[in-house]
Image (cartoon, grey):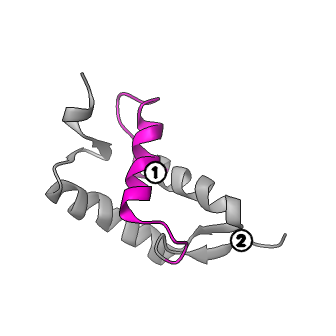
Amino acid sequence: MGNPKEVTCTEAGLTKEDVYTLIFTEMKKHQDGLEMKNIYDIINNKLKEENEILSEQGKASLRRLINSNAVQEGYGLYPIKFTRLSDFP
């Protein structure tokens, strides 16, 4: 199969909604939140299906999505953790 191709989420065909779905599905198993490394692993596990992996640019774009866009959309960020208060009882 060879070395995985380095890509961004967009290059891999993942939308913002796809990324959020992957993260929140996994977050249900980790009620105390996820660290950025965990989020990279979640996305890389999905990308692995197509022999792809996040590039450095892909990681930077993902951080921006989590740190900026997600906050503007109502997701709360706590030191290195990604949670949405309304998603928890």
| 39 sits to left or right of 82 | right
Q: Identify the amino acid type marked 2.
A: Pro
Q: Secondary structure at mark 2?
A: loop
Question: Along the polypeptide, which appears first: circle 2 or circle 1?
Answer: 2
* Residue of label 2: 4
Is residue 33 shown above or below 17?
above
- Choose between 5 and 11: the one closer to the eye: 11
**Among the 4 quarters of the image, the one containing residue 63:** bottom left
Residue that lies at the very extreme toward the right in this rendered image: 1
Q: Position of residue 26 (x, y in %)?
A: 47, 38
Identified by mark 1, the residue type is Ile
Report the magenta residues as a range: 11-37
Residue at image location 53% in from the left, 50% down from the top:
42
* Location of the C terminus (image quadrant): top left
Residue at (30, 58) in percent of width and height: 66
At label 1, counting other C-alpha atoms closer than 10 Å, the crowd grade (few under 14, some 14-19, many 20 or more) is many
